[in-house]
Amino acid sequence: MKRYFKNISTHIPSERATKQLPSWPAISIILLLVFAVIFPPGLLSGMNLYLLLLALFAWICSKESFDKNLLRVIAPFFLIIIIGLAVGSSADRYIFLKDLWYVSNAPIIISVGYVLYRCMPDLGSGLRAFVIAGTLLSLLYLANFAIHPDLFNLSTVALREVAGTGYYAPALAFTILFAYRGKWLEALKLPRWLAIACLVICALAITASFSRTIVIVTLIGVLASSGAFVRREALHIGVILVVSLLVIGILRMGIDVDSNEASTTFLGKIARSTDELTIQEYTDLKSINYNWRGYETARAWRYYSSGSVLGLAMGQGFGAEVDLGLFMPLGSGSKGERVRVRLAPVLHNGFAYLLVKGGVVAIGLFCFVLVSLYRIGRKKAASVAKDYSRQAARVMQATAITLTFTTWLIAGVFNKLDLFPFMLVAGFLLAALTRNEDEAT
């Protein structure tokens, strides 16, 4: 595959060469990111598979070897799938196939991003497409407040129920713009006024989402783009954690974390973040509701740790369900109504989900993917080259950290489509940052 795409471009395209490159990959990036929040997830998966089938056909006709860099990232997912299929062969068919979809979604999206870059090896145009898509989705989200300004009078929880929980594409667009600050015209072909407008619009959408996760993802992007993870990451991450805990501690001094207000306001939810994530099997319904993520993870750990030696190593397979110990309104009926269920096939904590489905082997394989993506970014994050690879490498670092963080909190990589923008850009940057390595082999 690498040689098949090699003849498209061997260097950063010149202005004349860039004009000759196909524009459909950039348009596809914009459409895919917008479609991800408009159309059903299944339809988008079908579109991605169609594109990959075309690329696969072209690769087979070329009779070239598969790119080892892409293989290193997607192969672990297929090994996890093999484990899940083999161990969970007797499970409920619907949940079994749903798990297959969740796990296969990530390598498919990453591969699509990879193919889009290989078809249009223009880093600036591709990243500009991500910025445009993020800005369009920011405007789409902010339109809720323009049409219904009374939304600002609602509590954070009520507002998010009406306007939605926000999109992650604006956070990615903000990260890219911040990484290329001062170089928007040369690197992204965005006039300064337009880049600033996009930056402000994305910032407004991020703020209006009142989402702790989206705000933290944006902060991760800013820190990575500033070079915080270029070297001595352990020290910098330690400092960030200490500062975060201090902020939470200060907020807790002025907020009653056990009150109803703490669970309905943005600052209140930040103050009780540590409570929500504490892994514990609570006995009263109020504590379970307020600290659902920690309770859910504790039940998953109980289910996983009760298995055999083989189960500890390879999990319970696709189709396995975690007994929550009580009925909760988590399912959806045929008319979209909430249905009370006791067995949970998916979890907020993606690592716990993976542990149940594939055991420590699956966790190890997934961590290999995350580390591989991060190391690809770290390798060029301190570069002084004039091809803007340093900024792209830092965006890749931010992407790897974001996928790790969000998988822990909201299923991340195993979420249906929320992290679609970051998985797509991971594949795009994987192809861009390893291009010269491919040409040397």
Image: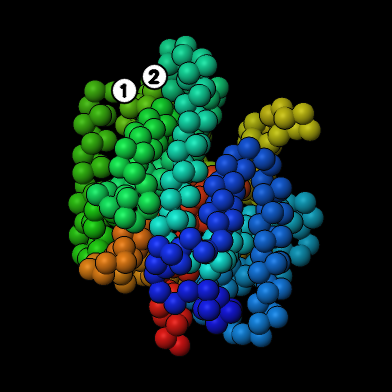
Pointer 2 local density, CA inside 10 Å: few below 14, some 14–19, many at least 20: some
Q: Nearer the viewer, residue 269 or 317?
A: 269
Q: Which circle's residue, 2 or 1, is located before the other in the chain?
A: 1
Tag 2 secondary structure: helix
Q: Residue at point 70% right, 80% down?
A: 61
**Residue placed farthest to the bottom in the image?**
441
Q: How many marks?
A: 2
Residue 173, given in percent of the width and then of the height, sits at 41, 45
Cα–Cα span, label 2 and label 1: 8 Å
Residue 141 visible to an observer of this rendering: yes
Q: Residue at point 72% right, 30% down?
A: 336
Q: Nearer the viewer, residue 158 or 90?
A: 158
Residue 435, given in percent of the width and then of the height, sits at 44, 75
Q: Residue at point 76% right, 65% down?
A: 89
Foreground label between 2 and 1: 2
Please state if 178 lies on the left or on the right of 167 as rendered: left
Residue 302 visible to an observer of this rendering: no
Q: Nearer the viewer, residue 196 or 410?
A: 196
Tag 1 secondary structure: loop
For residue 268, above or below residue 20 = above
The residue pinned by badge 2 equals 261
For the N terminus, the quadrant is bottom right
Pointers 2 and 1 in contact (C-beta within 8 Å): yes
For residue 61, above or below residue 423 = below
Q: Residue at point 71% right, 73% down?
A: 57
The residue pinned by badge 1 equals 256
For residue 170, above or below residue 115 = above
The amino acid type found where label 2 is placed reads Glu
For the C terminus, the quadrant is bottom left
